[in-house]
Amino acid sequence: MATASHFQTPEEAKSDAPLEAVVVRFAGDSGDGMQLTGGQFTLSTALAGNDLATFPDFPAEIRAPQGTTFGVSAFQINFGSSAIETAGDAPDVLIAMNPAALKTNVGDLKPGGLIIADEGEFGARNLAKAGYESNPLDDDQLARWQVIRLNISQLTLDAVKPFGLGNKEALRCKNMWTLGLALWMFDRDRAPIVQWLKSKFAKAAELAEANIAALNAGHAYGETAEMGGQVTQHHIGAAPVEPGLYRTVTGAEAISLGLVAGARLAGLPMFFGGYPITPASAILHHLSRLKEYGVTTFQAEDEIAAIAASIGASFAGSLGVTSSSGPGIALKTEAMGLAIMTELPLVIVNSQRGGPSTGLPTKTEQSDLYQAVYGRNADAPLPVIAARSPADAFDCAIEACRIAVQYMTPVILLTDGYIANAAEPWKVPDMGSYEPFPVSFQEEAPGEGEAVNPYKRDERLKRVWIKPGTPDLMHRIGGIEKNVGTGHIDYAPENHQAMTDIRADKVLGVAKSCPPQDVCLGGEGGRLAVVGWGSTFGPIHQAVRRARRDGKDVSHIHLRHIWPLPTNLGDLLRSYERIIVPEMNKGQLKTLLRDQYLVDARPVTKVSGQPFKIAEIEAAIDEALG
């Protein structure tokens, strides 16, 4: 997705525009360019100063048969002049490019919502592929909604006819025609999109001009055609936020920038070893463009090679980073044990997806919490943190880097498919406000008669970090248990007990350097706490806000540090009569909380591959309060 930047002036920050929000969903075949259309509409929305959240929803098949329901690609955006926390429960507007897109998405549309359908694609063959026995545009199947039928395909062909494109090439421009209409509907500027098209097709001027013509034609159609009272131009004012420079950012972009920032704050070069896997691949793509910041990227032949190379880079004095999704994390597990035994800093990013096995490769889930906290052989704890939104992923990546180098340990950073692909505005931070955590390597040789001990520790139980090749500091580390006092290989039972305890205590000590758990919304203590982690933040926060507005005694607690848990969390949870834990798995955080604090945490689970809706959390709150 293209990135938009917007400088929020003090005047805009004091905007008193009416608080309103609109949810628009673009849906079509996976070859119709819906992600590109949604991304460019997001760009124009960000430039208008609106707050926003997006939800790209990809088909799992690389290229499903055209016109089928399992090949539908959708992009939803919720934007407005008020604070936006989620991509929205239900669209106000659905733009459906074919019958399959309509059938797959129309059930989510608000009653009375607007459907804009490309009737040029509603022929007998496409209707049959989508499972329609009759054309829904011609009967009462869509009576609950307002329907505008436009022959977008033909209107696009007419708009690009002067450029001499073939029929297939010309129809590829219909997403730009659709985008032009949407830009008109919400009073958006076309200029940034025109500039983007000229840049994208710099080596194919006729394609640039054809797409620009389609964009302008869709916009002009909105201006001149009398489509009925349902379709009017509507302006939504800028959202009131703090003054400053804002840009749209996806979770993958934010993690990439945060990793680079974390390495710079540590004073280290960064090495990233990765292997392509959905939805984690974007991190490798972004980091490969940041070489000028001391970043080396390596696309390995497999997941094991990727993490092994990153461990080697950490041994050599760089900050090693690797990323994957659940299946790839499973393959990396043995090497994680090596990083724990050698006590080397390593950041492991897990962009979770639906599973098990290949599962739902393009859908979102939070099912890897057990894997992150417990999923290694033997007693092998490591810190685990979780980002709650695309913008939050930046700070979480810095935090992962800090913990890794300050405690000489691998760290897992959890995101998911929703965070990785979704976009939201992010206030570009002043990096001068971040506290550096520079690394100190051991360079001084031991005194006379003393041996080099790579497992010599400080008060945090962090071992020393020695760059290989440092004069008089030749040393050996590896996967076999080491002696507490010397770092030599030692199989003694009492030594293994001591080293296992030290590694566990070191990780538990991470909590002392982390802030205590806060209450995001509500008070400390009361009838009900809704506890979440990761991308459930938005729907939980909105649901709790609505419940409190109705006078209900409910609070929202959201965890960033999953392991070790915050030092005050047990007392905080015990101050509530009831606890519910919404998560996109079968209740993994709920089990962890019960285990650690013996509290009666109740699960609210969802494993459909789709994020929670606000209404689902509201219903869970009402049920918990009786």
Image: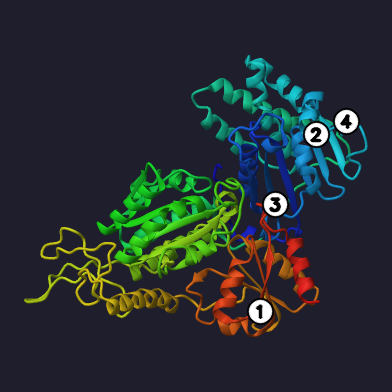
The residue wearing badge 3 is 78
Q: Please tell me which of labels 4 and 3 falls first in the chain.
A: 3
In space, the residues marked 2 and 4 are separated at their CA atoms by 9 Å
In space, the residues marked 2 and 3 are separated at their CA atoms by 29 Å
The residue wearing badge 4 is 134
Label 2's element? loop
Which label belongs to residue 600?
Answer: 1
Which label belongs to residue 131?
Answer: 2
Residue 591 position (above or below residue 123): below
Under mark 2, the amino acid is Gly
Q: Position of residue 104 (x, y in %)?
A: 75, 41
Return the residue nearer the eye: 326 or 622: 326
Label 4's element? loop
In which quadrant of the rendered image does the C terminus lie? bottom right
Q: Position of residue 101 (x, y in %)?
A: 74, 37
Identify which residue is drawn at 37% across, 52% down.
307
Query: Mark 2–mark 4 contact, CB under 8 Å?
Result: no
Identify which residue is drawn at 14% across, 65% down.
473
In space, the residues marked 1 and 3 are separated at their CA atoms by 35 Å
Under mark 3, the amino acid is Asn
Q: Please tell me which of labels 1 and 2 falls first in the chain.
A: 2
In space, the residues marked 1 and 4 are separated at their CA atoms by 52 Å
Identify which residue is drawn at 76% across, 30% down.
129
Q: Please tell me which of labels 1 and 4 falls first in the chain.
A: 4
**Residue 463, picture quadrant:** bottom left
